[in-house]
Image: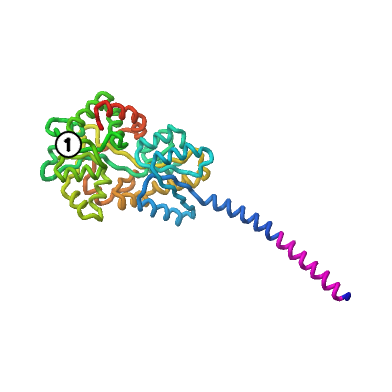
Amino acid sequence: MANKKFGFLSGLLSMSLLLAACGNNNESAGTGTASDEETKDAGVVNLYTSRHYETDDALFDQFTEETGIEVNVVKGEEDELMERLTREGEATEADLFYTADAGRLHWAKEKGLLQSVESDTLNANVPENYRDVDNQWFGLTKRARIIVYAKDRVQPEDLSTYEALTEEQWNKKVLIRSSDNVYNQSLVASFISLNGADAAKEWAQGIVNNMARDPEGGDRDQAKAVVAGIGDAAVMNTYYFGQLLNSEDAEEVKVAEQLGVFFPNQETTGTHVNVSGAGVTKHAKNKENAIKFLEFLSSEDAQGQFSEANFEYPVNPNVEPAELLASWGEFKAQDLNLSELGKYNADALKLMNEAGWK
């Protein structure tokens, strides 16, 4: 009986020691879990983006592979994402807001959704005119707003400037998107900045008078309408034309092959350019990682991939444009800080509406 009692007590002691050890292990595990969570949080950057390109997704994966920082992506329309950032406030998980058009980036800044950052790398990789004056957003890819024309009906020497498209020879021959398109709003905003509101309104009125039809569809639809004979020239962004030329749809390629590319205003104010860009959100929880991510996207490697795969011009001055873009020739761009596009957006839309631009 004594032996049995001793064995029973020994068993209780062993079990107590085991439970104590487990408790200590659990405490350690608990501490380790918290540490792991902190490490995990430190290895994350949360991105809200309105861009939907495979090129972007590939670059996000590359950034994770190179840095160990995981990129969590939320995609949506730009207005929807800005509304979400506003609604979420300090509780937002977003560290970066990434979208097309400097005007939209300016809106995000004006809504108090972004914050200034300091980065020597970004300052070196992104020229001053392609980033916000307060470093609240940085351009990452560039596109030019060009004139495409029907090769069988128009000669390059027939073209010169955006302003020339308002002349009598282009009556009922010009195709362009609607006034609610932000790319056109930014184009007109650039004219306000460079030439004044009166000249910009006169141009808008002249374009309305010379439209081949009421605006409809996107940039690629304007190019298709030129080939269909509805008009002779269209205003569109370069990367859309690159997409047409490299489309999996043979009919779209055929459309692009019948069009020529012209960079307007080379002897005057230069061709209008715009950017896709990103800014660190005001309430970013992973600010350092967000800045690292921006620096990566502005690097020579990433800029080259943007250009090769998505037909966008690099903003990094050390990177040459892709072969297709280079084949269209070098061009003089408008000399203005793209913050101006947002500054004059409301004025641009107002005068476009006054001109009857649908």
Q: Position of residue 138 (x, y in %)?
A: 40, 40
Neighbours of disc 1 within 10 Å: few (<14), some (14-19), many (20+): many
Residue ranking furthest to the right: 2
Magenta region, main secondary structure? helix
Q: Is residue 30 left or right of residue 135?
A: right
Examine the rendering and report whether any part of residue 118 can be seen. Answer: no
Q: Position of residue 213 (x, y in %)?
A: 19, 36
- Taking the spot 12% from the left edge, 33% from the top edge, the residue there is 169
Is 63 above or below relative to 216?
below
- Taking the spot 50% from the left edge, 50% from the top edge, the residue there is 44
Q: Is residue 14 magenta?
A: yes
Q: Is residue 126 magenta?
A: no
Quadrant of the image occupied by residue 294: top left
Front residue of 123/303: it is 303
Coloring scheme of the render?
rainbow
What's drawn in magenta, residue-wise?
Answer: 3-23
Which residue matches tag 1?
A: 212
Q: Mark 1 is on which residue type? A: Ala
Front residue of 87/199: it is 87
Q: Position of residue 92 (x, y in %)?
A: 51, 42
Q: Is residue 316 left or right of residue 155?
A: right
